[in-house]
Image (cartoon, coloured by chain):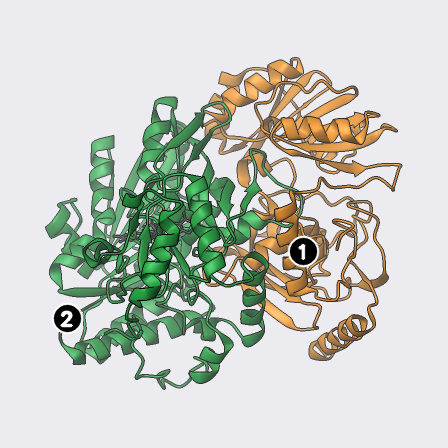
Amino acid sequence: MTMLKVAVIDRARQTEVARALRRVLPESSVLFNEEDTRPFECDGLTAYRQLPMVVVTPETEQQAANVLKICHAMQVPVVPRGAGTGLSGGALPHGEGVLLSMARFMKVLAVDPLARTAKVQPGVRNTVVSQVAGPFGLYYAPDPSSQIACTIGGNVAENSGGVHCLKYGLTLHNVLRVRGLTAAGEIVEFGSDALDSPGYDLLALTIGSEGLLVVVTEVTLRLLPRPAVARVLMASFDDAERAGNAVAAVIAAGIIPAGLEMMDRAAILAVEEFAHAGYDTDAAAVLLCESDGTEEEVGEEIRKVTGVLEREGASRIVVSHDEAERLRIWSGRKAAFPAVGRISPDYYCMDGTIPRSRLGEVLRFIAGLQEKYGLRCPNVFHAGDGNLHPLILFDANDPDQLARTEAFAAEVLEKCVAVGGTITGEHGVGVEKIDQMCAQFGADELDVFHRLKRAFDPAGVLNPGKAVPTLARCAEYGGMHVHRGALPFPDLPRF
Amino acid sequence: MSDEFMRAWAERIRTASERGVSLCIRGGGSKDFYGNAPAGEVFDTANHAGIVAYEPTELVLTARCGTRLTEIEQALAAKGQMLAFEPPHFGANATIGGCVAAGLSGPRRASAGACRDHVLGVRLMDGRGRSLAFGGQVMKNVAGYDVSRVIAGSLGTLGVILEVSLKVVPLPERERTIVRPMTQAEAIDALSWLAGRSYPVSASAWVDEALYLRLSGAERVLAPAAGALGGDTLDDSEALAFWLGVREQQSPFFANANSLWRLSIRPTEEPIPLPGTWMLEWHGALRWLRTDASEDEVRESARRAGGHATLFRSADSSAAAFTRPGATELGIMKGVKEALDPHGIFNPGRLYPDF
Ligand SMILES: Cc1cc2nc3c(=O)[nH]c(=O)nc-3n(C[C@H](O)[C@H](O)[C@H](O)COP(=O)(O)OP(=O)(O)OC[C@H]3O[C@@H](n4cnc5c(N)ncnc54)[C@H](O)[C@@H]3O)c2cc1C
C-alpha cells in the first residue's frame, strides 16, 4: 500500500535541526520523539504515512517566520499542515523535513459586520467563522463536509468547496486577502479589503496552491448575509441516469440553486442507516436541491424546480417545512463519508469533475465498472457543478481488492479527463493524484508550474514533491494518456 | 488552416524573443488608453475569432481571443444567458481577449463577482511560442496552479490569450432600477446596510447626489423588494441607458477634463476628503474621482482606505497608471512574468515600468 518509500529519520540531522529550531521556539513547540510526531504521520489520506523528522507548533507569525528562515538556511523541506483532513496527502510529512503545524493559529482577529469581512488566523476551523459571524446575521459560505474540523488555512491551500458552492463559489470566490510567509520567511500580502489589487492576481495563484507557494498566516474572508429563508427539496428518481439528466435540466431552465447534490441508492442506504435523514430508500437516486433568499425568491424557485423535476420524471418530491427538517435532510448528505466508512473496512474517494451533461453517461460507466471489478461504489456528487465523489469500497488487507480498486479508480479518472473534465474538483492533487497530472497537463504546462513555484520559492523547500510532478517523473511513467481501455501503469498503486 | 495560423504566431513570437523585439498585443484597441502607454510592434489578435463551444446547460462559453464582445453577448442573450461580470466594452470592437486581459468588471461585479471569478480556463501562447492550456471548461478544477485566473487582469504581459472559457449565468427575469436622492455619506451607510441583507440588488451607483439601485430577479421578488426600499422607479429604457452610461463611462460624470481616478477600497470607508467630483459603484467599494489632486495624494488616500488607486484616464501620459505593490510582492510578480515571458517581449511597461 505504501507506494512512497518511507524515509528513515536521520538522527544526527534531526538533532541538529531540532536544536536550531529550539533557539526560536519554546521547547514544547519542537517535537521529535516518535510518540509526539506519530500523530502527524498522515492526513485524511491514511494510506500514505511518513514520520516527520521534526514537528513544530508555532503560535505567532514571527515564530513561523523564524522556523522558515532556519529551514531555508539549512535546506530543510517544510510541510505546512492545518487540521490534517486533506484527502490527497498534501500534508503528508517529509522524512527529512519539518512539519509546520499551523493548528495553534486559532484566533478570530476581527469581524467587521458592516464591511462583511472576517479576519482570521489560518488554524481557525471553517465552522467557527460562521459561528462568530452569526450574531451579525452573516455567515461564511464555503462549507466543506469536513467543516467542523478543517481549517481556513487548509481551505485556502486546497481551494475547498462545499455543497453551497454552486451559487456562492469556492474558497477562491470568498477570500479577499491572504497574508503569509514565503519559503524564505518573508511576509507577503495578496489582496486587500478592497475587491481587487494592482498587478498580477497572486491571491488567485495562492489559493489552491496546496502549501507549495506560501505559508498562510492570516486570511480575510468575505461574509454573506444569511438568507432570510432556505428550503431544501428532495426528489426521488427510479433511475440514476435520469436523475443526472434532471440536474442538467434544472441548470438549463436558468436556475442556479444554492446547492444541487445527488446520491445514488447505495449511498442513500448507507446514509439512512447511519444518519436517519429520512431519505427515500426505494429510490435509485435522490437529488437534494436547496433554495435560499427572500420568502418570495424561495417560493418562486421551488415552484420552478418542482416543475422541471416533475417533467424529468421525479417519482417523489418532498420540500422541507422548517429549519429542523432542512438540517435533518442535509445531515445525511454531510455524513455520507463517515456513513460509507461504516459499511466497508476501507473506501477510496475520487474527486473528478465532468461537464454536467455527461453525468448520466459517466454514471452508467461507473455502474459498468462495479460489475467489471466486483467492487461496490456508492456515489455522492456535487451534481450541480459536475463534481463526482464515487467511493470505491474495499478491504485494504486483501491485496487483490486493492489492485482492483486502483484499476477501477484509474478508469474513472481517465473517463473524467476523456469527457472534458478534470482529475480533481476540490480535494487537490497532493501526492495522491500526482501521476494523473501527467495526463491532465502536457510537459509545457508542467514546466510553467515549476517556474511559477520558483518565483515564490527558488530554493524549493516548501512542500516539495507535491501537486506538480517533475517532468522526469512523467517521462518515467510514460505519461498517462491511455486509450482503448489499456490501463496506465497498472502496477502503480494509486493512493 | 488554424494550425498554420498558430504556427505563424508561434514563429513570430519566437523570433521576437530571440531578437528582443517588443510586441504590443492588441485586439480591438478599445482599451489602448488603459494602463501605461502601449509600446512595441502591434500583434493583432482580431483575426483569431469565433465562438469555439457554447453549451448553455454547462454554463460555459469558449471563444477565441479576437471574438467581439458584442458577438458573445448576443450569442448568450439568445439562450437567456449573460456574462455575469458585465464587462465594459469601451468601444464597439472590443474583443474577449482584451476583456480578459484587462480584467475589468462592470456594475454587477459587487453582487456577481469579477472577471477573474468567471474565467474557467485559458489557452495561452507564452514567450517561448508554446501553446499552453490551463484550467478547463468545468466549474471546479484544482489540478495545477490557477494560472488562468492570473491571466485575467495581466494586461497581456504574460502571453497571447488564444482562447478563453468563461462561466456564464442565466439572465435575470426582470430588472428594475430605483433612485433616491441622498448625500454620498448617506449612500455609503445605506449601501453597507443593504449589503448585509438579502435584497436582490445587482448593482448600485451613487452620482449627482442620488443613489441608484438595480434589482434583478423574478417580478414576484422585485415588487416587494422595491416597495420595501422605496424611491422612484426609472423607466426600463431610462434604466438601461443609465447603467450602460456607468459601464461604458458615457454618463455626464465622465465628461470632464480632469484626470479620472479609480479607487478600489474598503466599501464602508467614509467619503474621502479629496477635491473633485465622485461617483460610487460596487456598494462603495469602487469610487471614481475626477480631480486635479496630485498622484501622491490620491494614492495615499486609497491606501489609507484599505485599497489602491489607478489613474484610469489621464491627459498626462507620463504618470504611472497603477499603484506599486510591496517589494516582495513585486519580486514575485517579476518571477511570474519571467516564467511565461522570459525575454520580456509582451506589452513591456504596460503594467509596471519594471517588466
Ligand atoms: C470527511 C471529509 C469530508 C470532506 N469534505 C470535503 C468537501 O466537501 N469539500 C472539500 O473541498 N474538501 C473536503 N474534504 C477535504 C479537506 O477537508 C479539505 O481539503 C480541507 O480544506 C483541508 O483542511 P485542513 O485544515 O485539514 O488541511 P490539511 O489537511 O492539514 O492540509 C491540506 C493542505 O493545505 C496545506 N496547508 C494547510 N494549512 C496551511 C497553511 N496555513 N498555509 C499553507 N498551506 C497550508 C497543507 O500543506 C496541505 O497541502 C473532506 C475531508 C474529509 C476527511
The quarter of the displayed image where residue A49 is located: bottom left
Give the residue pinned by disc 1.
Answer: B334
Q: Is residue A154 left or right of residue A115?
A: left
Measuring from the top left, give residue A319's x and y in whole percent: 26, 39
Chain letter, disc 2 residue: A
Mark nearest the camera among 2 and 1 is 1
Relative to A157, residue A389 above or below: below
At a point 71% along the width and 75% down the height, the residue shown is B6
Relative to B231, residue B78 above or below: below
Q: Amino acid at mark 1?
A: Lys
Q: Is residue A46 left or right of residue B271?
A: left
Measuring from the top left, give residue B260's x and y in whole percent: 79, 32
Q: Looking at the rendered structure, which numbered label has been put on residue A431?
A: none
Camera-side residue of A402 and B60: A402
Q: Are marks 2 and 1 in contact (CB under 8 Å)?
A: no
Q: Amino acid at mark 2?
A: Asp
Q: Looking at the rendered structure, which numbered label has been put on residue A395?
A: 2
At a point 62% along the width and 26% down the height, the residue shown is B305
The quarter of the displayed image where residue A408 is located: bottom left
- SS of the residue under disc 2: loop
Q: Which chain is orange?
A: B
Q: Residues within 10 Å of mark 2 (few under 14, many from 20)?
A: some
- SS of the residue under disc 1: helix
At a point 25% along the width and 47% down the height, the residue shown is A334
Rendered hue of chain A is green
Camera-side residue of B270 and A281: B270
Measuring from the top left, give residue B167's x and y in whole percent: 54, 53
Relative to B246, residue A161 above or below: below
Distance CA(mark 2)–CA(mark 1): 50 Å
Measuring from the top left, give residue A311's x and y in whole percent: 34, 52
